[in-house]
Image: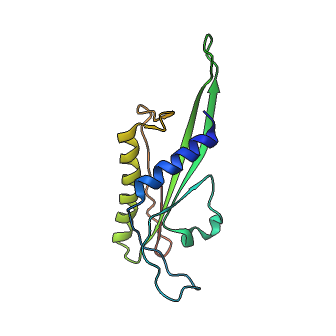
Amino acid sequence: MTKQNLLDALCDFTREAVKDLLLPVEMQEDDEAQPPPRPPEVYSMGLPDFQEAEKKAPFILHQVITANDVWPEGKTEPVSKAVVRTVFGVSHPNSQEGPLALLGLIERVRLALWRQRSICKQFRLDMKAGADYPIYDRQLRHFMPGKW
């Protein structure tokens, strides 16, 4: 397993899982009209400009945060593991519906992964490890971050 291949496959999987989920886009200074809702953009390892995270919403960011490779005795290939953090961001004009939109986005990806259990028949989800996903209670104007 290469970590880059894992991220590429995970991003493709995620794009497919959320392709029909349309979420609000915050109007920017350059916009002449309210942008239409769109599916989240999916990134790996970093946003193009993390300081502008609000402007990128809705988005999903996958990051490898730890990795481990061992070569068990008698095996012809190493066994690799990686822990991936997924950061979600939505922007919503309604402070009640926004956190629900964030939760819905997280749940969409989580359930797709748990149903599939593997990506590209190469990367298996460790079902025993479980998943923690804090949803931050602080909101930056209409921007709601969460991670898994």
Q: Is residue 45 above or below residue 96?
A: above
Nearest the camera: 77 or 89?
A: 77
* Residue at far bottom of view: 32
Query: Residue 22 location, x and y as percent?
Result: 39, 67
Along the line of sight, the residue nearer the viewer: 140 or 49: 49
Residue 72 lies left or right of residue 112; in this view the side is right
- Residues 51 and 76: in front is 76
Q: Position of residue 3 (x, y in %)?
A: 62, 39
The image's colouring method is rainbow
Residue lying at the far top of the rendered structure: 74
Say which residue appears at 38% left-offset and 74% top-offset.
Answer: 95
The N terminus lies in which quarter of the figure?
A: top right
Residue 148 visible, this angle = no
- Looking at the picture, does residue 133 appear above or below residue 97? above
At 47% from the left and 80% from the top, the residue drawn is 35
Q: Position of residue 140 (x, y in %)?
A: 50, 72
**Residue drawn at (37%, 53%) of the image:** 108
Quarter of image, res 61: bottom right
Q: Give percent across and percent down for residue 96.
A: 34, 71
Asked if 85 appears above or below 59 in the picture, the reply is above
Does 59 appear above or below 117?
below
Q: Residue at x 43, y 57 (%)?
A: 135
